[in-house]
Structures are given as C-alpha cells and as structure tokens.
Image (cartoon, rainbow, N blue to C red):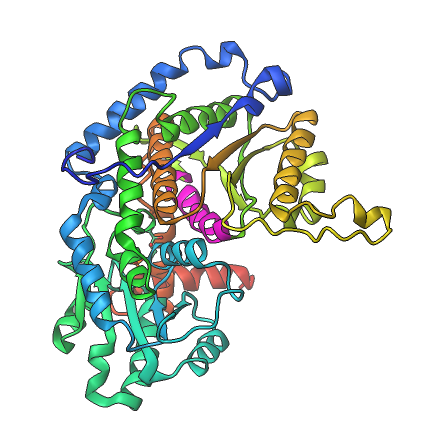
Amino acid sequence: MGSAGAWPDKLTNVRISFDSSNLLSSLIGPEHGLTPADLKGSDNAAYAALAAFKQSAEQGTYGFPLLPFQKELIASIADYASKLAGTYDTVCVVGIGGSALGAWALDCGLRGQHPLQAAFSAKNPRLAILDNVDPQFVESALASMTPKKTHVVVIAKSGATAETVATFMIVKDWLEAALGKKAAARITVVTSEGRGDLKVLATQQGYTTFHLPDNVGGRFSVLSAVGLVPAALAGFDIKKICKGAAEMTKLCWTKDLDKNVALRAAQFHHLVWTKKGKTLQVAFPYVNRLWGSAFWFRQLWAESLGKKKNRAGEVVHVGQTPIAALGTTDQHSQVQLYMEGPNDKVFSFWTVDKFATSGKIPKGKLGLEGFDYLAGQSLAKLIDAEQKATAAALTEEQRPNCNYTLSKLDEEHLGAFLQLLEFQTAFMGELLNINAFDQEGVELGKKFTFALMGRKGFKEFGDRFAAYEKKRKGK
Ligand code: PA5
C-alpha cells in the first residue's frame, strides 16, 4: 500500500489546496451550481470510492500509488544518471502517449516551456521528445542533434507500439552510423519485463533496461522509470519529485475530505458533470510551467474516463472531454466562447501562490494613462489579478469553476500535483463505476494500422479495412 514504508522520512510540507466555492449554487445559481440537495449523500459516495480503490490497490490490481515509495529503484535511476552525466547534451526520448507526456510535464514544470529554456549543454542537457511519426519532425529533430552528444531513451510499455518502434529503428540507425558498436551504451530502454519485442532487442543488444510494473498503465506511469529515467538524465532531482508524490499519496488515502484534495475534487467534479451536464473540463493553468502538465492531464482524463461500458457491462458512453487552456494567453483566444458559448464546461484553474520571480514592472512613469497605472507593480500581481478577474467573470455568467493552488512550483509540489491528479482520476473512475485503467477504444485503430503496414497476424483487420474502403468509395 501507498502508506507502507518509512519514506518520506520527513514531511516536505507540500501544500496544494482546492477551492470549490464557485461550483456552488450560492455563487452560480441552482441551474449550474451544486445545491445542498445535490451534495446530500455525496460524502458517503466519496468514501465508498476511496474504499473501493484502496481495496484494488491493496490487492495489487493498480500499482501507481506505490511508485513514489520505490526507494531502491529511484536511487538506482538517480545513480545511473549521475554516472552518465556530462557525456551528452541531449536526451532523446522515443515514446508516445503515456510513454512521453510525463517526461514532457516534468521538463516543462521544472525548466520552463520550450523554446524558452536556457541554452542546452552537457551541464544542462535538453529533452528532445520524439512522440510523432511526422517524417519532417523526426528528420529535423535528428538534424538538430549530434550523435556523440545524444543519449537515447526508448520507452514503450507494450514494446510494440508502431510509432515508437519505427522511430527508434531510424534513431538507432543514425546513432550506429556515427558510433558503431559504441551506440549501445548510448541507448536506455524502459519497457515491461515479461513481454514485447523491445525487451527482446534490449537483451540481444545489451542495452541498459529499466522496467515498469505490469499493474501501472502508461498514463499513470510518470513516477515509474517511464518518467523518472528521462527526468534523471535531464538532471532533475527525482528523489524530491517522488518525495512530494509520496506525501500526497498519504493524503490521498485519508478519509478526511478537507485534507484529501484528490477525493474532494473528484466528488465535486463528478457532481458538476453528472448533475449539471458539464461534459467538458478545461484545465486552465495560469503558470506557463504547468502547460506540459495540462497536456499530460488531457491524456489521463480522456483515456481513463472515456468509456463505452461501465463495470456492469452496460453501454454508457461516458466521458468528459478535457481541454487545455493557458492563462492569460487564452483569455485572448478562448474566453469569449467560455463566457458566452454553451454552458457545458467546468473550469479548473491551476495557480501558484508564489512565483520564483515577481517580474517587477519599472517604476518610471511615462505620462500615459494606459501605462502609468502599472508602473512599480509586478507581472506576478498582474497574472494573479487576471486569473481572479476571469474566475469572477465566469462566476457572474454562472459558469462553474474551481481552483487548485500550489503554494509554489518545485520538484516536490510538481510530483505531488501529478500524483493528486492521478488519484482524482482513479476516484472518478470509481464514482462512475467504470474501469479507468484500460483503453480498449484505441486498440482497433492500432490493429488497422498493423494490418495496413503488413504485420503478420492481422489479416482479419486488413479485410475489415478493405470493406470499409469499398463502402467509402461507394463500390
Ligand atoms: O495510457 C496508456 O496505456 C497509453 O496511452 C500508452 O501510454 C500509449 O498507447 C503508448 O503505449 P506504449 O508505452 O506501449 O508504447
């Protein structure tokens, strides 16, 4: 269980709060906001969701809560990365979906949004994430790297995802053409221990390999070797990331809804979604460094909660479409729709109490009314005012919105926040009575792709695709 083990030895004082006031009927009216009658009995439903998920985790069905407590593995990844440090200026991640987005969320969260990071060097290696098979994207990424200064991490839980395998074949070739047999030392593999051709290849070639547990799905794997190997190679303190996540895990197992933010948030989001028909969820960070996390969350929420059937096997076609928006940037792009378009969304603001820098605006007055009121203030104050103003405006328009606030953004808080969102998703799966951990809906497309690319064993899907094509062309 997540609460087992002595780690973290000391609490890190991670503080993440959830403000649900603007989801309530007292602020946005009874048509769109939660009334006392809506809330009645929902604490008990939340406790039942917690108990059910806890039981599954204790039985080992789902493994993500345990990840931040894997002290030996975390130390061995950190050790491995520190031995390689200085031998590369680029960490090239080859992976897709849950095998890429976690690394991106951590990189963006701790070093800032691309392309505004500091210049890369052997002391400050960049992460180049190859998560698409657009040929020009892959070609220009390779053109921007030097084989002798690149360390490749290929990540695939299944060991067989076509996009990852194809891209890796190109990257491997590129590396071997320059380095010959020495290329193998520049490749690290993250995959499942007991299955997949990537594991077979890694063994044949002698690549250093880290495994992820079978009971951890791709989108829940950021704190396994999937996210931690690239993060450690990029120079992040993965022990601190996991320490924050471990502390959050402890909170996520408590029955106290004032402390258990993940459970409280799942409870309120579930009610707003199912009782007020808010079928779109806008993840709205007012922090550029959380932009990568918003994209990571999109996959987590969409793939986990978008399901055809519930656990009883009934067809339910349930799902809440996640949208990523960035404040204040998207105030000038999306907010018109959010204010006046269909009232079908719930807004989740993600803010920080304290930025690492305030962005002081010069004091000097320019004699211009449109400039001078800002003189001597700060960007931190402005972004905070803009977020509060947007929340107030949405509330006046009866648009449900809530706020997650991190006291600051550092390794511990980022690890804790990602873990919180994973628990929130798992609890939501329980409240909806669906399996949040499978993804059968993406399998059919994968099988058609295998058939189209000539993989053995997929003839049935080749025939089905041919029938579809025939219909499309009206033959
Ligand atoms: O959450 C999931 O399991 C998926 O989105 C996977 O992460 C994605 O399909 C990539 O799979 P793999 O790691 O096997 O390449």
86 up-or-down from 31: above or below: below
Quadrant of the rendering where the N terminus is positioned: top left
* Residue 30 seen in the current view: no
Residue 341: give x, y in percent of width and height: 70, 36
Residue 281: give x, y in percent of width and height: 52, 37
Q: In this view, does 232 lie to the left or right of 213?
A: right
Ligand 1 rendered quadrant: bottom left
Q: Residue at x 66, y 40 (%)?
A: 386
267 up-or-down from 352: above or below: above
Residue 125: give x, y in percent of width and height: 37, 71
Of residues 444 and 257, the one nearer the viewer is 257
- 304 in magenta: yes
Residue range (magenta): 289-306
- 4 in magenta: no
Instruction: Tell me which corner region of the image, top left, top right, bottom left or bottom right, holds residue 150.
Output: bottom left
Instruction: Tell me which corner region of the image, top left, top right, bottom left or bottom right, holds residue 201.
Output: bottom left
Query: How many tags in the picture?
Result: 0
Of residues 126 and 337, the one nearer the viewer is 126
Predominant SS along the magenta part: helix
Q: Residue at x 20, y 78 (%)?
A: 185
* Residue 296 seen in the current view: yes
Of residues 77 and 194, the one nearer the viewer is 77
Residue extending furthest toward the front: 364
Of residues 77 and 142, the one nearer the viewer is 77
Residue 389: give x, y in percent of width and height: 67, 34
